[in-house]
Image: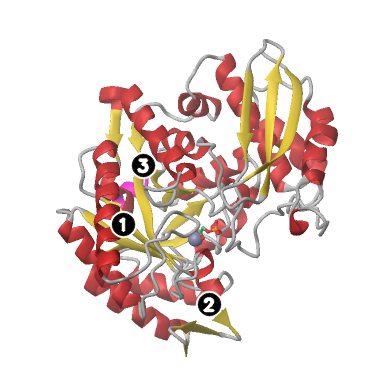
Amino acid sequence: MAKIQSVRALEVLDSRGLPTVSAEVTLADGSHGGAAVPSGASTGAHEAVELRDGDKKRYLGKGVLQAVGHVEGELARAVLGLDAADLPALDAKMIALDGTPNKGRLGANAILAVSLAAARAQAVSVKLPLYAFLRKAYGLPEDRWLLPTPMFNVINGGKHADSGLDVQEFMVVPTETPSFAEALRAGAEVYQVLKKALAALQMTVAVGDEGGFAPKLATHAEALDVLAKAIADAGYAGKVRLALDAAASEFYHDGSYVLEKKPRSAAELGEVYAAWSAKYGFVSLEDPLAEDDWSGWSALTAKLGERLRIIGDDLFVTNPQRLKRGISEKSANAILIKLNQIGSLTETVACVRDAQKAGFSTVISHRSGETEDPFIADLAVALNAGAIKTGAPCRSERLAKYNRLRQIESALGAKAEYAGGAAFRAAAAAR
Ligand code: PGA
Ligand code: ZN
């Protein structure tokens, strides 16, 4: 048993050049682990609190020195001497010390950084790769090792780019490739073909926060047409499918959804999604409606849920309580999982397990503000999550995750199974 001997933290910068928290944990046997937390832009109203200094003289108020101070002060004092093998006890102690329902006192960014760094240190101590250690630490079965289906966000809109598109993310999803390696290749080839197609249309090929292009296309249908053509031209028709993250809370104003400048009810917007889905064959639709439109979500899932995955991101915010409501009201049939929405590893794992038991599909996700830390790649494999969303095959903070998955796939060898299209079908979700 290796006890926690020291906990350090630093204010570092994320992929947008904004401050975030990194932490390092050292155990009594000398094992050492570090982690850095990500940060969202289209954050859900119900997420755990990301503590920012608000001191306008530093980083326009976005500094995280208070959170760093909490890691090295109160949190360090609470966890020094604890056994890093017992991650649930470690997280429970930090959550109790914070004492608020949303980690608002010490900061979810502070707590999560320690939670992840401790897991890494312990994995080093027991000489296991992180994904294998996490399986063991949370008592999960070791029968299957699923490599997640990647969801590549290749056209950026909403709050992530100035493309003018209301929908935040247009994704390509390799459902019919034999391996993760071939899925990565498919995503990268479609991305390069798309780049050429946009350039030929005299569109900009500069990229948004998640590495996708941000062309000023007039309508969403135009974006979908360009994408469908890029998939076909790259030779992947029927093998690579489309998915959207509308992030609809961002275009929900005064009780209506303003899409392409026209205000619409939830039911009217549902008709638009149904038409797009019929034409383009989506595998999933994330945050199609606003984060508190519970009745709208239930109606939309009843309408489209047989055909595709309806994924709750801002709706559920990786929160087991909100997920419970969603399961009982049939608000969705899939959940997006972001560590920093809830703020500890143990609560994140619990949320994924609850979702899987209810037959929901699970998608492990990055944030639009990321770091080079690939923790979520190991997490996705550890939990047999089935799918991962970590941006375009472009920008190293995104590729860090995809490349880590390649390493894991290679290390697992014949034991590695590619999740593929099954990750988006109901029968495979329940396990
Ligand atoms: P965010 O976007 O990290 O800016 O919240 C990602 C998402 O909405 O899925
Ligand atoms: Zn989202």
Q: In terms of sequence position, does the residue under pointer 3 or pointer 2 come before the other?
A: 3
Q: SS at mark 2?
A: helix
Kind of residue indicated by mark 3: Pro
What residue does disc 1 label?
172
Residue 29 position in % (x across, y down): 67, 10
Q: Which mark is residue 95?
A: none
Quadrant housing the N terminus: top right
What residue does disc 3 label?
148
| Residue under the image location 61 percent in, 56 percent down | 321
Residue 237 appears anywhere in the view: no
* Label 2 CB sits under 8 Å from any ligand 1 atom: no
Was residue 429 drawn as part of the magenta stretch in this picture? yes
Residue 374 position in % (x across, y down): 50, 36
Query: Which dot, 1 or 3, sits closer to the camera?
Result: 1
Marks 1/2: CA–CA distance: 23 Å
Pointer 3 and pointer 2: residues touching (CB < 8 Å)? no
Marks 3/2: CA–CA distance: 30 Å
Name the magenta segment's main secondary structure. Answer: helix
Q: Nearer the viewer, residue 113 or 19?
A: 19
402 in relation to 266, above or below? above
